[in-house]
Amino acid sequence: MTISIRGITLETAQKKLDLWLEAEDAVAAGQSYTIGSRSLTRASLPEIAKRIEYWGALVSKLESGVKGVRIQRGWPLDDGAR
């Protein structure tokens, strides 16, 4: 059985984490550049850091087998013992 959280498997989460880690390396090497009349500006490091934190936490949860938050409800019973 493949565990997923919100439909995201460990394989997908790991790919996303790897992608954001690569983005961090690219930004660290140069935030923007221009070739001729064309320019490229990469995402901000704080935004990349947020995404790395998110995907890293999701990978950890999926590796440990945690399926997410479990919410339970309970009602007190009146056993008539008064």
Image (tube, grey):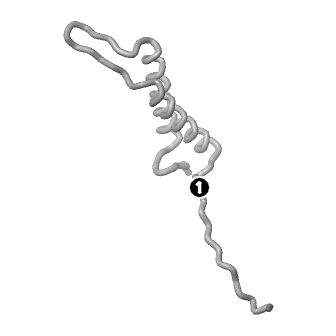
Residue 76 in the image: x percent, y percent? 69, 80
Residue 56 in the image: x percent, y percent? 56, 35
Residue 59 in the image: x percent, y percent? 56, 38
Mark 1: secondary structure:
loop
Amino acid residing under circle 1 = Val
Relative side of 38 to 10, left or right: left
* 51 vs 35: above or below: below
* 76 vs 28: above or below: below
Q: Which residue reaches farthest left?
A: 37
Q: Residue at x 50, y 25 (%)?
A: 21
* 28 vs 71: above or below: above
Q: Which residue reaches farthest right?
A: 81
Residue 43 in the image: x percent, y percent? 39, 25
Residue underneath mark 1: 69
Q: Residue at x 59, y 55 (%)?
A: 69
Q: Nearer the viewer, residue 71 or 4?
A: 71
| Number of other residues with Cα within 10 Å of mark 1, as a class: few under 14, some 14 to 19, many 20 or more | few
